Every structure is written in structure tokens, then in C-alpha cells.
Image: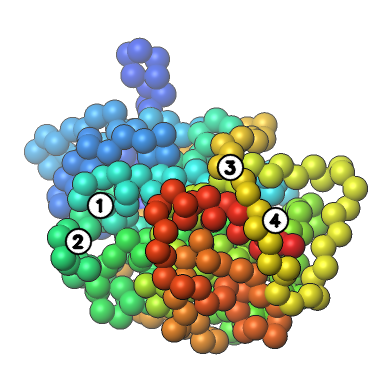
Amino acid sequence: MLGEGGFGRVYKGRLESGQAVAVKQLDRNGLQGNREFLVEVLMLSLLHHTNLVNLIGYCADGDQRLLVYEFMPLGSLEDHLHDVPPEKEPLDWNTRMKIAAGAAKGLEHLHDKASPPVIYRDFKSSNILLGEGFHPKLSDFGLAKLGPVGDNTHVSTRVMGTYGYCAPEYAMTGQLTVKSDVYSFGVVFLELITGRKAIDNTKPQGEQNLVAWARPLFKDRRKFPKMADPMLQGRFPMRGLYQALAVAAMCLQEQATTRPHIGDVVTALSYLASQTYDPNAPTQHTRSNSSTPRARNVGGRNSEQRNGRSPNHHSPRTSKHGGEVSRTSSTGGDSGRRSGLDEMDMAGSQAGSPAQTGRKRETPRTADRQRAIADAKMWGE
């Protein structure tokens, strides 16, 4: 058995061809009922992408419900971020950026390539499974929802998901958009950067909610180095840290309309993932007490260079869905700013936020992405 959750159990199996598989056996009295089973089968039958887990087959016989997936040998992202045993090597900076970029590409496929768009609704670290070379794939589509079509701006639905990851507007009103997924992505990306859990009740009061802890720190660039995961032991590029935190801050904007499009997030993170960091290279000095960086027009192209680590073979871990979700507490004012990664800039401690006001997008999509690359380079100056 690989794992167990509120939906049932997951076993490792092997097909006649010799292919290793993960078999999810749903508990008929569990959290994942017939609707979620059907949604998962339909979604994964229609959606195919290198960053989405592959559904090999299913069985619905009487009250027996089985889902057969490809086996992901390195387990979940959660396994490699939280409660890591001393003998296990922590994820390095390059691998974290690669995982974030790949997971964002999976989300982009759901939002931009599927028609109508698909809202994942349960984006969290335990639902990101890792294959050889730490290649990430989104799993568990039981809560996925078709997005709005035509003139509709959102879909209304019962609030589901996992506490700590849900966007505040969805938790409060049940109104769901693709920007709700962008918020959840921001939480996971912040987990990757900080090594902290989305919700950790062992932390002191005020630090238990990851986003609430991070919001005041976003306002002071001098505190950014303190947000990095201690397990990295300082082995990360300071400029890359600033750029990554800028992306996370934009995704976590309280107003859904001010969050960036996932396609722009992919562009920025693909750039970050292409900037390999050599911990043995001379220390990179970055001025951390300056305010807004010099505005420069920097060109660049989207690089897909990937950098993996030697794999540790761990079984994929299963996750259980959260039920009720209350609004994430927050401090600091982030509302009222129009944003897009094409207009972002990194601000210093006097500005109140690492993401500054930008005009609404007026340029074509391709131009936006080129500017996102250019600005991603500029944020860390």
C-alpha cells in the first residue's frame, strides 16, 4: 500500500506489460463519491499533457471503484518539503524552480488549452506528484470544475478544497474563476520558497497561516532573505529569490482581478528555472536595502532548460480533500492595484508591496510574454 486518505487507499501494482501503476481504490463511504469519481475519469480522459498525471484505466463494478494511474516514483511535492527526515536530501533551488514551472504549465493547460477552461480547485503540494528527474504532474481531479463560458465571469459552486490554499473570494462567496487557481498556485510556490506549510498549527500565533505570515514580509525587501527555506542553507541566488517572491506576491493578491494570468506566471517561472544556480560559484552579491530597481528594458526568450537532481525513490503519497474553508486571514492592503506580470516591478521597503501598479494589458499576448521575461530579469536588480 502506498497511502491512505479520506477517499480510500492507493496501492502499487504492475500490469501484464510490466508497467508499474498506482491503483486508487475508493472507499464507498469515503469523501470521494460517485460524482468525484466520474469527474476524474472524464477530466483525465479528455486532458493530456506532460504535466498532468496519466489515467491508464478505471473500474466501476457494483460498488467497487478503481482508478489506475501511472506510477510516480518520487512521491508528492509535500513529501519533499515538509517533515523531511534527516537522511533525505532536501530539494535544491534549481529543482524547486523547475517543479514550480512544470506545475504552472499543467495549470496553464487546464486554463488555456481546454475548452471550456477547467478550474482545478484543489491545487496543493500533496497533489503535485513527481516522476523521474523531479518532473511534476498534477493529480487528483475529483474536484475539478468547468470554468465560465460566454459572458459569464465565474461559476458558482459549493466551497470545496483544502484550508490554507483556497482563494479568499472563493471561500467567502463560492464564486470560482481561473484566478482562484492562481491564488492556490501562489500558496504552493510560497511553500517551495519558504519550506513552510500552508497551515502549521505548531507555529506561534500569527505564523500558522503561511500567507498571513508572508504578507507583512512582502512589504520589506530587506526581509526577503529571511523567507528562504532554512533547509537551503543559503544556497540560492539572491536575485532569483527576489524574483520568485515577486511572482508569489502577485499570485496572492487579495483581489482576483489583480492576479496575473497563469500564462504569464509560466513565462516568468520558465525564465527562473532556466537560470541555473551553482552553489559552488562565488557568492552573488545583491543590494537588499535598495528601493525600486533601476528601470531597464531587458530582452529575453523563454528558455526551457531543465535541471534535475538524482532521484530518491519514494512512493507517491495520497491526499485527502478538505471540507469547510474559511477566509484566509491577512494583513496589509493589497487591493486596488491592477496587475499583470507584464507590468510588474520589484519595490523596496518604502513602497508597501513588491508589486507595483501597472496599466491594464493593451498589448497582444505574445508581447505580454516577452515583457514578462524582460521584467522577470529586472525584478532582482
Residue 117 numbered tag? 1
Q: Of label 1 and label 3, which has the lower sequence position?
A: 1
Disc 1 packing (10 Å; few <14; some 14–19; many ≥20): some
Element class at badge 4: helix
- State the residue position of label 3: 301
Q: Which picture quadrant has residue 380?
A: bottom right
Q: Earlier in the sequence, mark 4 or mark 3?
A: 4
Q: Which residue is mark 2?
A: 148
Q: Secondary structure at mark 1?
A: loop
- Name the residue at 51% across, 87% down: 333
The label number, if any, that marks residue 98 in the structure image:
none
Quadrant occupied by the C terminus: bottom right
Most foreground residue, 209 or 259:
259
- Quadrant, the N terminus: top left
Q: Are marks 1 and 3 in contact (CB under 8 Å)?
A: no
Q: Residue at x 12, y 42 (%)?
A: 63
Amino acid on which the number 1 mark rests in the picture:
Pro
Q: Earlier in the sequence, mark 2 or mark 1?
A: 1
Give yes or no for contact between labels 4 and 3 (Cβ–Cβ under 8 Å). no
Q: Disc 3 residue type?
A: Arg
Secondary structure under the numbered disc 3 in the rendered image: loop
Q: Position of residue 26 (x, y in %)?
A: 25, 45
Residue beneath disc 4? 240
Cα–Cα span, label 4 and label 2: 35 Å
Which sits in the foreground, 37 or 44?
A: 44
